[in-house]
Structures are given as structure tokens and as C-alpha cells.
Image: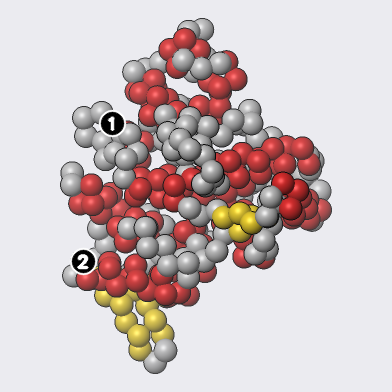
Amino acid sequence: MMMLENTEITKYTFSGHDSFQCRQLWLKKGYDYVQEGKNFNDEDAVVQLGVGKNMVSSIRFWLKAFNIIDNKDNPTEFGKRLFDDENGYDPFLEDEASLWLLHYHLVKNGFSSIYSIIFNEFRKEKLFFNKETFVNYVKRIGESNSDLNFNENTVAKDFIVFANLYKNDTESKDIEDSFSGILSEIELLKTTGKGKEEQFYIENTERDNLPGAVVLFTILDNPNYGNSISLNSLEFDFNSPGSIFALNRSGLMNKISEIVSEFKDITFTDQAGIKELQFKKKSDAFTILDTYYGK
């Protein structure tokens, strides 16, 4: 694993997934396994999870990356609320909101740094990119840090996994194909060109398929946000809704309108050119999701 220091990300970590992207049923399967008190190091983990040995460690990696389990392999609050059989919001990820929440945790959690780098920084500098331009970007960051032992192969593998996780392959005939990326349906990552000419881009758009409740959850979940938050902060800050969800100004305003119309304790003010989202009182972030999922 490679690490480097940065003002926003305290350490960068790469690899850990054994080059396997997260498959559709892995998170639920892994959550249930942990919830039953089983250990990933158990000899029968391969049999219990029904995957190869390398995939066992990959499932464990993705559970941590998506904030479903903590560093001690115990289910997190988010993991329990999403995947619990009896009271879980959406154990089989049938609501697109759940995919947006997983995307948010993957970026914000920082367990696998490539996702934070790409959504918070890299895509803002490079409109069109590929594996080579990303590897060079990370290499450039590493050049200002003497502690970094840059490994081109490791970063390149991370990029391939990232692309497979998000890329929406419209030519694939089977949506349930176990090889399709778990986050492909939210259509954040677009492609242009074929073969060696293939380029990726993440465009800031309205994101009409992103529920306002998910955006509000991420705002309430952000410890850097007080009771008054500027529109610019919501659009451009590190781990802001604008950064993580690739929202343009009009899309962000649409989400804010949706939030303000539903919650009487939240208002949006525009005085002397200062645009702010204001909270009279802040709810617990999960109460927003409780309401959204009808819990």
C-alpha cells in the first residue's frame, strides 16, 4: 500500500481489492457473514461466501471501503441501517438512493483513496481522462512527498477497478450480470471513444435521479458544516455535495429547493449576494433516511 500526505486527505492508500471490482451481491453477502459473527480468516470462509480465496479478502476490502464494516470487521451504523434483514433500508439495493449513498461513503470514507482523489480533485482539473493521465496525476502529487514510494502498476490497477465499478456499459445485455459495476446505474462516469482512444469524463449535471434526501444526509453528516453553509461551500468544498455527486449550480439549487420545501427548519437565503443554506436546528442525519425509506 502507498501513502502520501495532503491538506485534505491525511493519507493516500492504494490497492487491497486484488483487482476485483465490487460485485452486485458482495456487500449484502459480506454484511450477513460478519453479522453472524464469522471471521474472514476462518478456513471455511471460501465455502461460506461461495467465492475464491482472493475474493474473500476483496469482499472484506469493499465492505470497509463502502463503510459497511469498521477496521475491526464490525458492522458500522450505516451498514446495519442499510443491510439489516429485518429493519434495513434496502438490503438488496433496489432503490437508486442506496447506490448514491454507497458512492458517497466510498468517496468520503477515504479507505480507498482513488475515489476521493477523482471526485474531489482530479476530475476538476481534467475534463477528459484515462488511466495514463490519472497515473501521471498521482505521480505528480507523489513527487512533492519524499515518503511516497510511487508504484505505477498499483495505481493503474486501482484506476481499472474504478472504471469497472462506475462505467455503464450500455452494450451489456444483462443488467444483472455479476460482472457489471455496482455503481454503474447512477451513471456518473461517461466514456467517449473506443479501445486505445477511450476517454472517461465526469460531467457536472443536474443529477435528476439523485434524491434530495441523500444530499441532505451528506450535508448533515459533514462535521465541517455549521448551521449556515454558503452555496459555494456546498458546490465546491472537499466532500461537498457538488464535489461528490458532480452537481452543477442549477442541479444543486434544485436539490436545495427540494430540501427547503420539505423541511420547515431549513431555509435558503440570498441577501446582498450572499447565498446560504440555513438550519434553525439540525436533525440527526439518519432521521432523514428513516423518513425517505419509510422506517
User: Type of residue at label 1?
Assistant: Asp
Residue at 44% x, 38% y: name it: 175
Apparent side of residue 92 relative to residue 183 in the rendered image (left or right): left
Which of the pair 196/264 is nearer the observer?
196
Q: Which residue is mark 1?
A: 84
Q: Is residue 56 visible?
A: yes
Marks 1 and 2 sit apart, C-alpha to C-alpha, by 27 Å
Residue at 81% x, 53% y: name it: 143
Please say if 38 is above or below 184: above
Q: Is residue 220 visible?
A: no
Q: Secondary structure at mark 2?
A: loop
Q: Which mark is residue 263?
A: 2
Percent from the top left, x then y, of residue 106? 49, 45
Percent from the top left, x then y, of residue 249? 45, 74
Image quarter in which the N terminus is found: top right
Which is nearer the N-term, disc 1 or disc 2? 1
Q: Residue furthest top?
A: 43
Please say if 59 is above or below 269: above
Which of the pair 59/281 is nearer the observer?
59
Task: Tell me which colouring the rendered structure shows.
Answer: secondary structure
Please say if 114 is above or below 88: below
Residue at 59% x, 30% y: name it: 20
Residue at 64% x, 31% y: name it: 19
User: Type of residue at label 2?
Assistant: Phe
Percent from the top left, x then y, of residue 252? 40, 70
Image quarter in which the C terminus is found: top left
* Crowd rating for badge 2 (residues with CA inside 10 Å; few <14, some 14–19, many 20+): few
The reply to whether callout 1 and callout 2 are in contact (CB within 8 Å) is no
